Image: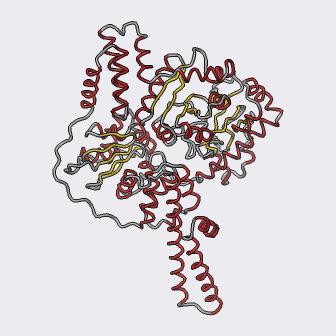
Amino acid sequence: MSGLVARDVIDQVRNALDIADVIGSYIQLKRTGQTAKALCPFHKEKTPSFHVNSARQAFHCFGCGAGGDLFKFVMLYENVDFPTALRMMADRAGVVLQFEEKSAHAKGGPAKDDLFKANEEASQRYQKELRQSPDAAAARAYLEGRALPQDVWKEWGIGYAPDQWGFLADSSGPRGGPKVQAMAAAGLLVDNEKGHFYDRFRGRVMFTIRDELGRAVGFSGRLLKPDEKGAGKYVNTPETPAFRKSRILFGLDKARRPIRDHRCVILCEGQIDCIRCHLGGFSNTVASQGTAITNEHATLLRRYADEVIIVLDADTAGQKAALRTAELMLAEGFAVQLAALPPGEDPDSLIVNQGPEAFAAVLEAALSPMNFLIGTLRAQPDWQTQAGLARATRAALELAGHAQSAVQAEQMLREAAAGLNVGFRSLQSDLRRIQRQKYRPTPATEPSAPPPPAVERPADELELAQLLGTHSDPELTGLVRQWLRYDLITDADCRAVIRALAEEETDLMAALDEESDVCKTFAAQVVNAPQKIVGEEPEADVLKAAQDLIARIWQRHLEARRQELGRTLAHTSGEKRTAVLQEFAELLLDQKKVLAGWEQAQAIIEIYLQRLDG
């Protein structure tokens, strides 16, 4: 393999594959949601210490210390170099490798919080334009025609992007200024071949998209001119550090508390459908962003709910999409129901034309995934033939194979047995056989070298990395970004891992591509470690633990500065010595305040953040 493979192609290969599927094709894994464990293939052991984390795309063995991403696993298992492992995985993923003359990867750019601010400012301007501009008359008429009054516009951040090239661009300051950079990084501005920036969204009704914490992460723009050539009806913000379609669900910021209260989430498609459900009283509703539901969506919802009701269109495409979503949700441990809409209806039209009661009836009539699948299979004209029954049985077994508990799998098999008029025991036996065939035997391995000695790392930095790695909580990552400077973290590996986790990098191992193998192994160890905080209110306990760790890191920074001043005192006199003594005394007081509780710590940390930034 000559030349360098473009980094985005490497990321494409990595993102196209689930590390658990790759490793599961080599050794037998026992899965539980997004994690799995096995006997390590790299050293002999009787108790599984080899862990795989699909959400973070990382593996780690706590016995021998091996760890990394899927490429590292293939390199170790197949005894090949990185280019060969990449080529093997590219073939598996169906990705054509492309080459570049030199690496063009560049870190940096505006901070994620700057992107949130840019989006929020744009949202407010779009909303004002919708309410006040004469040019927005068609947009107002469209929304009123959809029975969405002005109070809904404000509540849901609905606005209008005028049909202008410079509505945002012309007021964003100089070309290389921080505001332009933030807007461009947020996907609001696009530059042409001459380097001039212009607005991405023009002549569209704008729906503000927020994450579960209510931060503006992007937009979905609905075109008002249906005859405009080459323009999509809906255009979304492109992928940015703040907006990742694979983990953003429209309406979750408003639905989060109702979902927690009901422990149930209603999943539909489209912003207006979601808004209409909320207006109709179904406040635990969220919507995907015009893309298929992903593992990350399922993992995100699992923090709030135990049950999901998937609302689907009555056509064949809607049925297939709903069953694919059901498989993901079953694999995440959800109780799943599928609710089929009447032909030609969506949640918006059904609630507007027939009232919330009609939609409630659709939800009440929802079926389990297996009963829904059996209904579609029995609708096939040949389902009772030998070939048709074999196809139906395979489909039922495949669906049941996604269940994460034996009880759920048994219930699904009983539903399949009743619906297909076949024996339950026979289905149970076939499912076990299929599951055994998924795995290749673990190859014999020679005794390996003893695990490498543990690297001594500052306890507070190590614990903060572990906290971030084992708890996917936006409040936690936001807390770290707001109150901790990464350059205060003294251990280089901890600093790289904490930065990647706090910045909510979807693929942790990809974000650490330029770090050392020791760092990547450390990252794999962190995200596969067991959670230490599992109390009655784990989210509050996690935030409290993070606050304590941040305070301890700041205290160490202040202590280092105090020691530096102590050394300076031995060589100074006069007015300068007085100033040093004064700072020395202030540091002593500030150190005590930082450790006296989070409320006092915040006030001190904010002062020092301003000094460091200034």
Residue 28 in which image quadrant? top left
Residue drawn 37% across the image and 57% down it: 522
Report x, y in % for residue 22: 32, 38
Above-or-below relation of 563 to 225: below
Name the residue located 26 percent from the left edge and 28 percent from the top edge.
Answer: 432
Q: Is residue 612 visible?
A: no
Locate the N terminus and report the quarter of the image it occupies.
Answer: top left
Foreground of the two, 598 or 174: 598
Give the left or right position of residue 476, taking residue 395 as reference.
right
Image quarter where the C terminus lies is bottom right
Based on the displayed image, in which of its 4 quarters is residue 276 positioned? top right
Name above or below for residue 551 compared with residue 289: below
Task: Please give left or right for residue 31 compared with residue 128 in the image.
Answer: left
Q: Locate residue 332, reporting x and y percent.
A: 42, 37
Q: Residue 279's spot in the image, x, y percent? A: 68, 30
- On the image, the x and y values in percent for residue 212 come to 58, 43
Viewer-proximal residue among 1 and 419:
419
Residue 37 lies left or right of residue 156; in this view the side is: left
